[in-house]
Amino acid sequence: MTNAQHPTSAPDAKAEVRRAVASLKENAPDAGSTTSDLSIDEELNLHSIGWEPVQLVSGLSVFSTPAGLWNWGQGEIVAAGEAHEQAFKYAIKRIHGEAAMAGGHGVVGVHVERRVYSTHIEISLLGTAVRPVGAKAVDASAVFVSDLSARDFTMLMVAGWQPLGLATGASFVYAPRRTVGTVLQQQSQNVELKNFTEAMYSARETAMERMQSDALALKGSGVVEVKLVEGPMSFATHAVGFAVWGTVVRLAKDSHQLVRPTMVVSLNDVEEAFDPSALA
Amino acid sequence: MTPPSDLPEAAERRLSAGAFSSGLSVSDFAACLELGLEPVGLVQGFCAMQQGVYSMMGLSRGLSPYGGSQGGYVQNYQCPHGMIAGEHRMWGQNYQQTWVESAWNEGFTSSYSRMLEEATELGAHGVVGVVDTVSRLTDANVTEFHMSGTAVKVLDTPAAASTPWSTYLAGQRLAKVFEAGYVPVSIVASVSSIRVWASCVTEYLMEGMGMWSNSTSPTEIEQIVTAMSQARFMVRTSARDQLHGDALHGADLQLSEREFEKGDLEVEAVLRGNRIRRYKGFDPLPVPKPTVRLS
């Protein structure tokens, strides 16, 4: 997104900098300190729709999984799926609580860090609580948690939609071992390992269904920016995992507001990024 | 603040010479000139800190949890099994390693003030594009703090009379900060360090032996969650305490964990960012328009 009416190099930039630096002699304004991990572009994006950052907030959880869970069995590894789900839910609850306490109306740009070990699963969330400029705290139930960047959040709001929360789903499934006879028989063939393919499909269906249930529980109409992690784990050669998460959204206005992108044809020579003669 | 006499004689000679040096890229250099910021020198500060061992608690598990911390956050965990055995962890503890934090803070602050000292020597108003690195200097417990940045003078402005301002930003990103109505005040960094001595329950859960912790289903590992949450909370609180009403922008939180044995962890969090101050109200901004670039 660009802001054509506000070029970054205003003609009086030098005077503005002098004025800004001179103001450092005065004391800081008597307002509460805010913290955020947003870039200045993201903050300007937020401001353009009347929102501002409040505090950096986090939430995490670590859930144990029984040892020996991963290698022998059939069907879904239920305990691992449960541990993943609970860890996500607790982490979301905690970041949500921090945001509500800081007076935020929501959290944007949530970074999701997810680690799956053989004995425990760790979920860590970090984001910036935001609110409409100067707005008072709202009821905690109205505070949303979203992994959309501030830029995407701005775009979503402009299009008439609102984020409601994070939806997640995960499933871990055993890929049944082949018999020794089958292994030997298939050793010299190009052959699909149906045990793995079917395990992947099974894990995918369960995880997606769980994420969809989360979205429906939040009364959302869809999930955007879905992130997907799938595959085997280094410590479990006969199991596959599938995890998804994304932001649940709902139409906030009567209808979708069409945001028509403007075509831009750059006249700059791509090769020439900097012209030293411009400094003269 | 490090006394001015800290500056090596050779540095004073070099800084008084005519040519300037700068760590800025060419485009950042151009953007600085456009803002009326004239680079006057690449300034640096170093500090090598040895982190002392506070007590034997840092090396091996003691007989009791009491006395392991030196002020700061402490939380104890008791064994629910009522067993007394040499290999059974009858207690667990989370404690803030205040001496680790204080070594880090001293190293960071010393290298920072030494960098500012060089900037002051050059008559600079500020330091832009600060880069700070914290790395192990040797195999021993020695950490090197290295800070560098480009000292700048604000053109057509009286000579600097106070400590130079500083920021991790440079070039277009710095220009946008000014344009958004903010002025950089200083870089901000904070650290928190928590040591976890696992209790028996934590150890069993981290080993996946939930049945020994009276749980057969997935269970939250409370001691570890508390330690990690506390590290994140303390590092943010410490950074906020340095703001004095200003805002922290572009925060970067780095987390690290070191596991010694199952559940015995050291959790460290480092938060860096730019302290900025609003000097004018926001101009009304139009809603950004999405564009499709054809090239």
Image: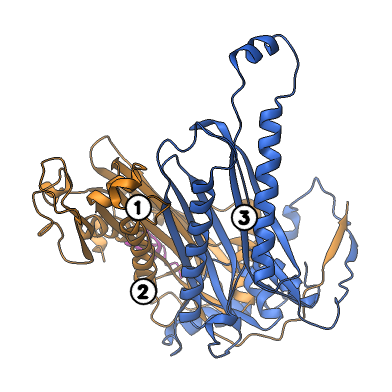
Packing grade of label 2 (10 A; few <14, some 14-19, many >=20) is: some
Classify the position of the N terminus of chain B by image quarter: bottom left
Question: Which of the two residues, B194 or B15, is positioned nearer the viewer here?
Answer: B194
Q: CA distance from mark 2 to mark 1?
A: 43 Å
Q: Is residue A225 above or below residue B14?
A: below
Q: What letter labels the chain drawn in orange? A: B
Q: CA distance from mark 1 to mark 3?
A: 24 Å
**Residue type of the residue flagged with mark 1:** Ser
Q: Which residue is mark 1?
A: B215
Question: Which of the two residues, B295 or B30, is positioned nearer the viewer here?
Answer: B295
The stretch of residues the image draws in magenta is: B113-125
Q: Is residue A131 above or below residue A216?
A: below
Work out whether disc 2 and disc 1 sit on a shared chain: yes
Q: Which residue is mark 3?
A: A169
Q: CA distance from mark 2 to mark 3?
A: 40 Å
Residue B8 on the magenta segment: no
Q: Is residue A178 above or below residue A3?
A: above
The chain identifier of the residue carrying mark 3 reads A
**Residue type of the residue flagged with mark 2:** Gln
Nearer the viewer's eye, disc 1 or disc 3?
Answer: 1
Visual hue assigned to chain A? blue
Of helix, strand and loop, which one carries label 3?
A: strand
- Left or right, B222 with respect to A135, comes to left
Packing grade of label 1 (10 A; few <14, some 14-19, many >=20) is: some
**Residue type of the residue flagged with mark 3:** Gly
Question: Where is residue A182 drawn, in percent x and y?
Answer: 66, 15
Of helix, strand and loop, which one carries label 2?
A: loop
Q: Is residue A111 visible?
A: yes
